[in-house]
Amino acid sequence: MLEIVHYLHIISATVFIGNVIFFDWAVGGALARLPVNERLRFALAIRPFSGHLIMGSLAITLIAGIARLFLSGAIQSIGDLLGGYGLKAMAALILVVVSEGIAAPLRKKMRKSLVDHDDAEYQKQWRKHRAFNTALVLSLLALMTSMRMGW
């Protein structure tokens, strides 16, 4: 069971991180280069496909990651959360949850700028979102590497 949960965690995390990087760097960049009046149409066309994939893979990553902690035996009691591995796992969980609380308002501002056809605001919010998510991805990779990717 542990191997299946670990596999789900790694695959879903890969899908999530890959989409975050792709959307921040490729799609966001493409939107930034499109004429202002075409951005909203493109964003609305791609959103139904991307939202469920990104948020679904995030949910599976979180659930499988938490399950993996307990199934692996790394966390057997509340006290284990205060040890090195437990603290890193909690840091990763907190980082992801807090980051979504920070990134969501940035995405909302980006969407508003698309609706308002405000090029300067879109560029500003897209760069903030991209920088924030790049730092998040690098931080999570550093944490996961320090945890030996769970093995």
Image (cartoon, grey):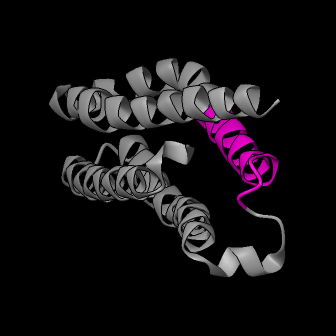
Q: Quadrant of residue 129?
A: bottom left
Residue 8 is covered by the magenta coloring: no
Query: Closer to the camera, 119 or 43?
Result: 43
Taking the image as shown, residue 49 lies to the left or right of residue 23, namely right
At horizontal 32% and vertical 39% (from top left) the residue drawn is 24
Query: Closer to the camera, 47 or 76?
Result: 76
At horizontal 79% and vertical 47% (from top left) the residue drawn is 67
Residue 69 is covered by the magenta coloring: yes
Check the picture and name the quadrant holding the N terminus: top right
Most common SS among magenta residues = helix
Chain part drawn in magenta: 54-74
Taking the image as shown, residue 72 lies to the left or right of residue 120, namely right
Which x, y percent locates residue 131? Answer: 25, 56
Which x, y percent locates residue 77? Answer: 84, 72
Instruction: Please determine whether, in this image, residue 141 is positioned above or below residue 11.
Output: below
Instruction: Please determine whether, in this image, residue 80 is positioned above or below residue 39.
Output: below
Query: Closer to the camera, 141 or 40?
Result: 141
Which x, y percent locates residue 25? Answer: 25, 35
At horizontal 18% and vertical 53% (from top left) the residue drawn is 120
Check the picture and name the quadrant holding the C terminus: top right
Which x, y percent locates residue 53? Answer: 61, 26
Q: Quadrant of residue 57?
A: top right
